[in-house]
Image (cartoon, rainbow, N blue to C red):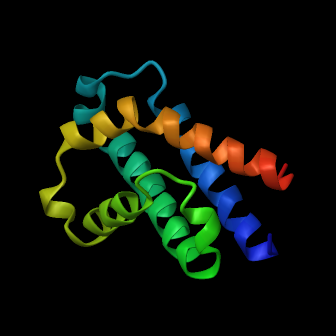
């Protein structure tokens, strides 16, 4: 795996870790009323989507190991360009129901390629 791919995997790992940390012990109602929390989570999801988009271009074999990578990239585009149509409920659902699986897939890639 090339250095740039490893950097992108690192970025994915860090961004998903931050989302998990930011949202630990939080509920949807906390997310809805805390503009700083919403901004932080959305920014990290933008990083996730952008890292996957770049990884798709330079290492397509690796990016396909991430389930729904195309949907994640699309979600990033909505966050960046369609900010006015973002639903707090949808973002929170992703945090609650998709983030753990994504983090597991990233951990598997890191393990398989010896990324610390």
Q: Is residue 92 above or below residue 62?
A: above
Residue 76 in view, yes or no: yes
Q: What percent of the width, then of the height, locates residue 46?
A: 42, 61
Along the line of sight, the residue nearer the viewer: 38 or 111: 111
42 horizontally vs 5: left or right: left
The residue at 33%/44% (across/down) is 38
Along the line of sight, the residue nearer the viewer: 4 or 22: 4
Q: Quadrant of residue 36?
A: top left
Farthest residue toward the left? 85
Q: Is residue 31 above or below residue 59?
A: above
Q: Quadrant of residue 70?
A: bottom left
Residue 34 in view, yes or no: no
Q: Quadrant of the N terminus?
A: bottom right
Q: What percent of the width, then of the height, locates residue 89?
A: 20, 37
Q: What percent of the width, then of the height, locates residue 66?
A: 53, 53
The residue at 37%/52% (across/down) is 42
78 horizontally vs 112: left or right: left
Q: Is residue 99 above or below residue 116?
A: above
Along the line of sight, the residue nearer the viewer: 92 or 60: 60
Farthest residue toward the top? 25
Q: What percent of the width, then of the height, locates residue 110?
A: 75, 50
The residue at 23%/24% (across/down) is 29
The residue at 28%/34% (across/down) is 93
Q: Is residue 105 above or below residue 113?
A: above
Farthest residue toward the bottom? 57
């Amino acid at each position: 795996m090339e250095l740039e791919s490893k950097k992108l995997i690192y970025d994915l790992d860090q961004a998903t870790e931050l989302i998990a940390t930011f949202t630990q012990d939080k509920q949807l109602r906390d997310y809805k009323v805390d503009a700083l929390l919403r901004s932080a989570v959305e920014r990290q999801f933008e990083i996730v989507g952008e890292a996957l988009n770049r990884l798709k271009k330079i290492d397509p074999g690796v990016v396909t190991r991430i389930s729904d990578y195309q949907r994640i990239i699309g979600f990033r585009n909505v966050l960046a360009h369609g900010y006015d149509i973002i639903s707090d409920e949808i973002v929170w659902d992703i945090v609650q129901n998709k983030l753990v699986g994504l983090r597991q897939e990233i951990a598997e890639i890191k393990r398989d390629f010896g990324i610390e």
